[in-house]
Image (cartoon, rainbow, N blue to C red):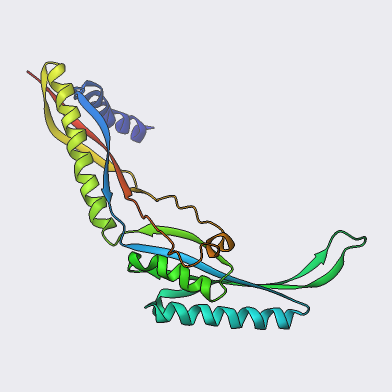
Amino acid sequence: MLHRVLALLLLAPLVSQAQSAPVVPQISTSATAEVQLKPDRASLAFSVESHASTAAKAGAETARRQRAVLDTLRALGITADQMSTASIEISPEYAYNVAPPTLKGYVARNSVRIDVRDIEKIGALIDGALAKEATGIGSLSFSSSKADEARRQALELAVAKAKGEAESIARAAGGALGPLMDLSAVPSYTRPIPVEMASSKAMALRGADATPVAPGEITVSATVSGRWVFSQR
């Protein structure tokens, strides 16, 4: 009992000081900034699909066509480290217009994704793959090797914007902005460029025309929140 009384006596001054501590006026703001940059990288998928009476035949035909596509991509400057298999699938096909459904054959699909480091080549890569019986082209997305630099620039702009707004609030309230108390940033956001690809069949009907590709711009966004001391004059 004596120990409990002594503990309460020791805590009493601390509680009293906490209750009497002055409240520091603060100003809190948040801001978002964006940086635009032109892409210099791209990712693109090419797929091949074959139909045959057996799974082995469908797989073999798809493999033959895919090798031709890959050879063409290599001839156009795509190296082995820029290629990766995205999917391999062989599945049965059924005719559902009869009862019961009957097996009519097999379909094999093979998809490869490539990283393009020279986006000026995208049109030629698409046309070359189509010429070698690629049956699907899609998942085109653009990126930039300077994204990290743009993200840091966006953060700097967001901090300056947040501080500028805090200074305006302080002046409007008849005071001045004091020392920084806290500053945080949410994960930066890169807004991708939406790209719609026509079907490979429709693209092939263009004949000798080259496939046009317009990469546009990438938007890198950063948001920060800060708290400053408000100094009254």
Residue depicted at x 48% and y 74%: 84
Extreme residue in the left direction: 233
Taking the view exactly as shown, the residue that stands out farthest to the right is 99
- Residue drawn 30% across and 32% down? 6
Residue in front for this viewpoint, 97 or 11: 97
- Residue 89 seen: no
In the picture provided, is 206 more to the left or to the right than 188? right
Q: In the visual, does 152 lie left or right of 127?
A: left
Q: How many marks?
A: 0
Does residue 159 appear to the left or right of 64 in the view shown? left
Question: Picture quarter containing residue 32?
Answer: top left
Residue 2 position (above or below residue 105): above
Task: Answer above or below: position of 140 versus 155.
Answer: below
Q: Quadrant of the N terminus?
A: top left
Q: Position of residue 54 (x, y in %)?
A: 77, 80
Looking at the image, residue 169 lies above or below residue 77: above
Question: In the figure, residue 106 lies in which quadrant?
Answer: bottom right
Q: Is residue 161 above or below residue 69?
A: above
Q: Nearer the viewer, residue 21 or 144?
A: 144
Q: Quadrant of the C terminus?
A: top left
Residue 215 appears left or right of 11: right
Residue 11 at x, y percent in the picture? 28, 30
**Residue 90 visible from this viewpoint:** yes
Closer to the camera in the image, 76 or 169: 76
Residue 200: x %, y % from top left:
56, 63
Image position, residue 231 (x, y; %):
11, 23
Seen at 66% across and 83% down, the residue is 60
